[in-house]
Every structure is written in C-alpha cells, then in structure tokens.
Amino acid sequence: MTTPRPALLILADGSLFEGEAIGADVPVSSGEVVFHTGLSGYQEVLTDPSYAGQIITFTTPHIGNYGTTAHDNESAKIFARGVIMRQMARRRSNWRSEEPLNVFLRARAVGGIAGIDTRRLTRLLRETGSLLGVFGTADEATLRAALAKEKGTAGRNLVAQVSTVSPYDVKNTVTHGTKPFSVVAYDYGIKRMILRCLGEIADVHVVPARTPAAEVIARRPDGVFLSNGPGDPAMVLDAPANIRALLSADVPIFGICLGHQLLGLALGGRTFKLPFGHHGANHPVRDVVTGRVEITSQNHNFCLDPDSLADKVDVTHVNLNDGTNEGMVVRGARAFSVQYHPEAGPGPHDSRYLFGRFADLMRAGNP
C-alpha cells in the first residue's frame, strides 16, 4: 500500500481544502475550478479538449470504479489541468478495463486531489461561480503564489492549444448502398465520439481551426461541421470570418458547443460567461418546436445572447434550468447548431438524431 501524499487545494476566495494527492506527482497545478454532475464517463470528461485550462471537480463521490480503456479516450491527451474528487476507487471492476484511473492519470502527467468534501466545494462554486484555484503537494505559500499568476479561461484563445496541426481523414463506417457525404470538420477541440457519429454518415476531412474558408470551399464538401472546443469564443479570432464565407457559399453547416457560439458570433451575436457553466450529463433541454424534452450532455462556460441574434436566427432549443439558448437555425441559410453534445459519450443519447438532421440537410442539396 502506497503512503498517502498530503495535498492542498486553494481557491481564489481564500478557501483551503486538505486532501491527498492522486495521479501524477504534481507539486503545483492551477486553473479554473468547475464541477461536473455526471454519474459516469469520467474518462471521457478528462480527455475532452473542451476542459483545457480547467480543474474538474467530480460531484459523484466514488470515481474510477470501472477503470479506463483506450477506446473511451476523446483525444490523444488530457488538456484539463487536474481533477478533484471525494474518493478514488481502490479496485476497478469491468471487463473492458485496461488500467486503473490512477495509472491512467500518471501516464499522462496529470495530477489531482482526493479526500476533500466535494459537496462543500460544489455548493461554494454554485454560490460564487467558477473560481480560479490551485492544488498540489507544494507548501501553502508556493501554491498561493502560483494562484496569484493564474489568468483563467476568459480572454484566452485555448483553441490554439488543442486543435490539430495537420489535416486528417476519418472514413465513413456505415454503408447505406449509396456514396457517403463529404464533410469538412473544423477542429476547435473535436471529440472522437463526434467523429464516430459523423463517420456514420460521411467521409470526414478534419482541418485545423485556422484553415481559411476558401480552402474548405475548394474541396466542394456536402457540408461543414463546427466542433466543440475550450475557452472564450470571442478569442477564436479567425473563425467568424471563415464561417461568414461558408454561409455566403451556401454550404450546409452544423455546429456543436463552441461551434454553436462561433456561428452566433459570425452572425454578429454576442457571448457571455455563465456563472459556473454547464458541465454534466443530465441537463434538460426543450425543443421549442415539438415541445419534447431531451436530457443532454453539456460542457461549456460561455453562452450566446439570444437577443443579439433576434432578427437572424430562430431559437430551436432552450435550457430548462436557466432558459439559455441551446440551439438555433439560421434564417435564410442551411445552417443550424446546438449548445449541448448530441454525441454524448457515454450518454444520454436523446439527441443523436441531430446527426441525421445534418444528413437530411446535406441530402436536400444533393438530390
């Protein structure tokens, strides 16, 4: 049995938590502390590039009980700054498991802190909003000095840290007896589960976030996908102009999460930062056309102001917790987007139909 390594978590409001270090030996790690309410999917959350710059608090008290498997990774590495939990499972029990969560974290040089009261921490974040924080095995003075230098996620282009450097292809995996669609996907921090869902309807060509629209249009794709990603959408400076060019070329467009926000910015809309963001797998969203309620997976800190787009889009989905914009269609264009994650690894899958809607949109332009 390994000897526990004492660790501290300090928040920007001065709150201090004592616990034990887990994962890699990280003396100091700082970032924006957020909480995630999903009961499962800890591996998918950790490897989601949208968490770049953040320290993830899991509200479920027991994490790691089914281990990890390479198939569930949403990206090649962990971009999150660290993880906070009440207790890490001492044993893993699942036939798919390839290695324990603690080993998984160490192999990726990611640390964390366990043994703290995550209920108290979550209540604090809900009352005050997301806070900058720092954790590690270093002494308190060193940790506080690091916290004073942390800038958080607002006003930073974190997409540049997570986007692919070179284009690559994902081939269609489901044969329908007809030629698959051709889709160009902008990688602002794209998840592998999204690529699997797109791969069921199309051959996908993934391009870096800064790829000029002219290069995309030259490929004559059936559609363009705008991916999820981390940080402040207003700082992804090249994206709005590229998206406007794609809209002018009448290319079918589907956006998810950050892609939804960037589509709104391209139309002249505004974004704002939510108090503590939406991070979890149980957010109720209402389809305003059908009245149907979907339980959705979400991970975002910023949101579109619907009033800034009132004459340019029709809102299609609304968050039932706080009334925020969760989906829209662009008037006079073949473009739609949602704020949540319809691919939802590991679930829920209420919204997977949206990939079919994208296929229908492309099919309408290719009779």
Image: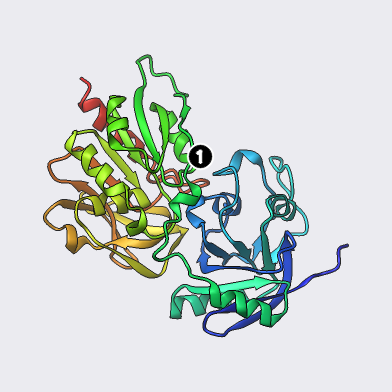
On the image, which quarter does residue 183 sit in? top left
Residue positioned 44% across, 55% down in the render: 230
Residue 124 vs residue 79, the one in the foreground: 79
Q: Is residue 359 left or right of residue 76?
A: left
Residue 266: % across, % down: 23, 50
Provide the secondary structure element on which disc 1 rests: helix
On the image, which quarter does residue 265 sit in? bottom left
Q: Is residue 325 above or below residue 209?
A: below
Q: Amino acid at mark 1?
A: Arg
The answer, for residue 48, to whether it is visible in the render is: yes
Residue 161 vs residue 348, the one in the foreground: 161
Residue 217: % across, % down: 27, 30
Q: Is residue 261 above or below residue 213?
A: below
Look at the image and tell me in which quarter the N terminus lies: bottom right
Q: Is residue 2 left or right of residue 79?
A: right
Residue closest to the far bottom:
14
Residue positioned 73% across, 49% down in the render: 93
Residue positioned 70% across, 72% down in the render: 115
Look at the image and tell me in which quarter the C terminus lies: top left
Residue 222 vs residue 53, the one in the foreground: 53
Render colour scheme? rainbow
Residue closest to the far right:
1
Q: Is residue 205 left or right of residue 65?
A: left
Residue 360: % across, % down: 26, 30
The answer, for residue 291, to whether it is visible in the render is: no
Crowdedness near tag 1: few (<14), some (14–19) or many (≥20) residues, C-alpha within 10 Å: many
Q: Is residue 80 above or below residue 238?
A: below
Residue 152 vs residue 82, the one in the foreground: 152
Residue 108: % across, % down: 68, 51
On the image, which quarter does residue 88 sit in? bottom right
Find disc 1 in the rendering and name its residue: 192
Count of all numbered marks drawn on residues in the image: 1
